[in-house]
Amino acid sequence: MTISTTVSPEGVAVVAMSHPPVNAITVADTWEIADTFHELGRRDDVRAVVLTAEGRGFNAGIDIKEMQSVEGFEHLLGSGAACFAAFEAIYTCPVPTIAAVNDFCMGLGVGLVGSCDILVASTRARFGLPEVDNGALGCASHLAKLVPPMKLRQMVLTCEPVTAAQLHEWGTVYRLVEPDELADEAMATALKIIAKRPRVVRAAKTALNLIDPFDLQRNYRLEQGFTYELNLHGDGDQARDAFVEGTRGVTR
């Protein structure tokens, strides 16, 4: 995967993910996202960050094929640690973060978006958690910021996605635009924020995190615990094998 970062003269950093064909995330990818946001947060010239993707999809979640190519639990545990670090780096970044979602955003991608402060999306975007189908749990903590409580339960248990248009109706998506307008809209949103006093904006970001009713890291860690338990029972490995083999179905 390639993580590219550019910083405009005004101080807007754009972090773009690109990993054909569907932007599935590897463990190395995820650590790189964490490192990138930590580095940007230390730069005085960066006043806002846009997280986006190139190619097909914003994010297809974890790279299941990579995970199944490694024996044992070491890779699974490494993926969990990397996801935890990436979400925390985005959430605690000292400056506002804007997710610009071009198309499908699944699994781990929901965690990335839910860790951001503002969401803009294209009319093609949709969001979902296929975790239960893959024998795992995760990122319901972050999806809870995006959808109402009963919708959250329905999405987790059925693995059915929701459209960006629905999220826009609920006030979760700040701007809903055509795909070719997404980059400009994300930049316009960032410029609106950086026109304000930098110290005040950073203080506001810190205060918002402190009063946030969603304890993302604690809740996500709890979900990870159930994922590890399911892998000890064998459900996770069986579901991922079925995904790789294209035979995913109901197992006991």
Image: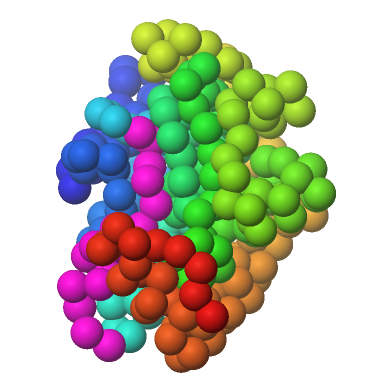
Image position of 150 with respect to 28: above or below: above
Q: Position of residue 23 (x, y in %)?
A: 29, 43
Q: Can residue 191 be seen in the rendering of this structure?
A: no
Residue at x 79% of width, y 55% of height: 213
Q: Is residue 59 magenta?
A: yes
205 lies left or right of 63: right
Q: Magenta span: helix, strand or loop, mainly?
A: loop
Q: Judge by depth and name the residue closer to the eye, 9 or 93.
A: 93
Image position of 135 with respect to 118: above or below: below
Coloring scheme of the render? rainbow
Q: Judge by depth and name the residue closer to the eye, 111 or 160.
A: 160
Q: Position of residue 46 (x, y in %)?
A: 40, 33
Q: Is residue 101 magenta?
A: no
Image position of 103 with respect to 157: above or below: above
Q: Quadrant of residue 245?
A: bottom left
Q: Position of residue 157 (x, y in %)?
A: 66, 58
Q: Position of residue 166 (x, y in %)?
A: 68, 26
Q: Can residue 176 be seen in the rendering of this structure?
A: yes
Residue at x 19% of width, y 47% of height: 1
Residue at x 54% of width, y 45% of height: 128
- The C terminus lies in which quarter of the figure? bottom right
Q: Which residues are magenta?
A: 57-72
Q: Judge by depth and name the residue closer to the eye, 155 or 225.
A: 155
